[in-house]
Image: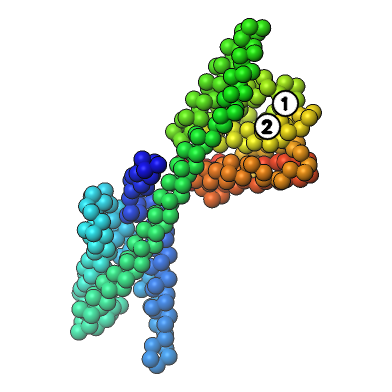
Amino acid sequence: MSVERSDLSRDASQVGWLPDFCRMDTFFVVMVAVEIIVLAAVLMPDSSGNTQARDVFTASLFAQWLALLSCVLLCQARRWIVRWPLHLSAPLAWAVPVVTSLLGAAAVHRLDKMMGLQMTVPPEHALRFAFSCAAMAGLLTAALLRYFYIQQQWKAQVSAHAQAEVKALQARIRPHFLFNSMNSIASLVRRDPLTAERAIEDLADVFRAALGAGQGAWTLGEEFDLIRRYLAIEQLRLGDRLRTEWRITAETALDRAIPKLLLQPLVENAVLHGIARLPDGGSVVIQVRNVDAGVEVKIDNPCPPRMPATSGNGHALESVSLRLQHYFGPQAWMAVAPAAGYYSVTLWMPDSRAGGS
């Protein structure tokens, strides 16, 4: 257990505390925060009750220029800054926008004086103007770095949780599934050796995929190939009680990348908690179609009418939902629709992953 924790901590630390200011989403957050501060400062009434609404454009242009320059500098210096220990790199990252604002304000005031535009403060207040800009930049930078740090820690925690779920998924190949499979194969060795050989190959593929569940992704088609092998093994035990219907109307979706073993646990639940508990068995229906700039996968199966809807499979549903959103982002979703004698799980995956990949 201690080894697993250290691995997860190391993975989380590799994320880095300083955000990538070259990314458009990070840059957008900075620019919006700067604009909010500018509007609050310019439109705030003074002691006489007047506002400086006419200066909004000038102040916004100046502040956004400083923010843009600071983002460019942090973008270029990030690779060097993060090499230092946190107690040194954090003040260094904070100092970049502060120094940029101090020098930028001094340069703008000097240029304004030379050109006679009178768009900034009088010369006698030049020093206070520069240090005020630096102080405001320091406060805003501290708040933004704190925000990005907390966000990064949350992402690292989600990633670590997802990795832990993968390890749990690898360990949840139930011993009775292995024993039942081996017993079924043993009964076939003499009377049907070819079927027994195929079953051993299928069983090996299932366990090989389970051991590599956290190692990258594969296509939806490859996931379905594994599911077919898993169902072939279960059919040795259940016989005609287990039937499968494939309704794939989006063939191009089979090339979509998904996390390994994302759907297999859902099919396993459909068999163990549904088909296997019914005397006459039933059909596992797997549907794939294009819906709303994404792909929808739906798995339906009959189940005992008096069995609680989530009996025995709550952990698998939670794990799949977590891995789904970790891979595709919060726009992906999973919905469960239990009913009397019936169970349905639907997943929707967007065309693009979180982070634009």
Q: Relative to the observer, which residue lies in front, 140 or 90?
A: 90
Image x and y of residue 17, in percent: 33, 54
The residue depicted at 71 percent of the width and 24 percent of the height is 238
Relative height, residue 180 to residue 41 (above, below): above
Tell me the quarter of the picture where residue 223 sits.
top right
Mark 2 neighbour density, 10 Å: few (under 14) some (14–19) many (20 or more): many
Quadrant of image for the N terminus = top left
Q: Is residue 228 above or below residue 16?
A: above
Q: Quadrant of residue 225?
A: top right
Query: Which of the marked residues, 1 or 2, is nearer the chain's N terminus?
Result: 1
Say what secondary structure mark 2 lies in.
Answer: helix
Task: Decide: is 193 above or below 263.
Answer: above
**Amino acid type assigned to the residue bearing label 2 in the image:** Val
Q: Residues within 10 Å of mark 1 (few under 14, many from 20)?
A: many
**Residue in view at x 46 percent, y 43 percent:** 164
Counting from the top left corner in percent of width and height, residue 104 is at 24, 68
Question: Which residue corresponds to mark 1?
Answer: 242
Secondary structure, mark 1, is: strand
Q: Does residue 275 show up? A: yes
* Above or below, 356 relative to 246: below
Q: Residue at x 68, y 22 (%)?
A: 237
Query: Mark number for residue 271?
Result: 2
The dot on residue 338 is none
Residue lying farthest to the bottom in this orientation: 48
The amino acid type found where label 1 is placed reads Leu
The answer to the question of whether label 1 and label 2 lie on touching residues, with beta carbons closer than 8 A, is yes
Image coords of residue 112 (percent x, y): 25, 74
Give the Cα separation between the discs numbered 1 and 2: 8 Å
- Residue 107 spot, x, y in % from top left: 21, 69
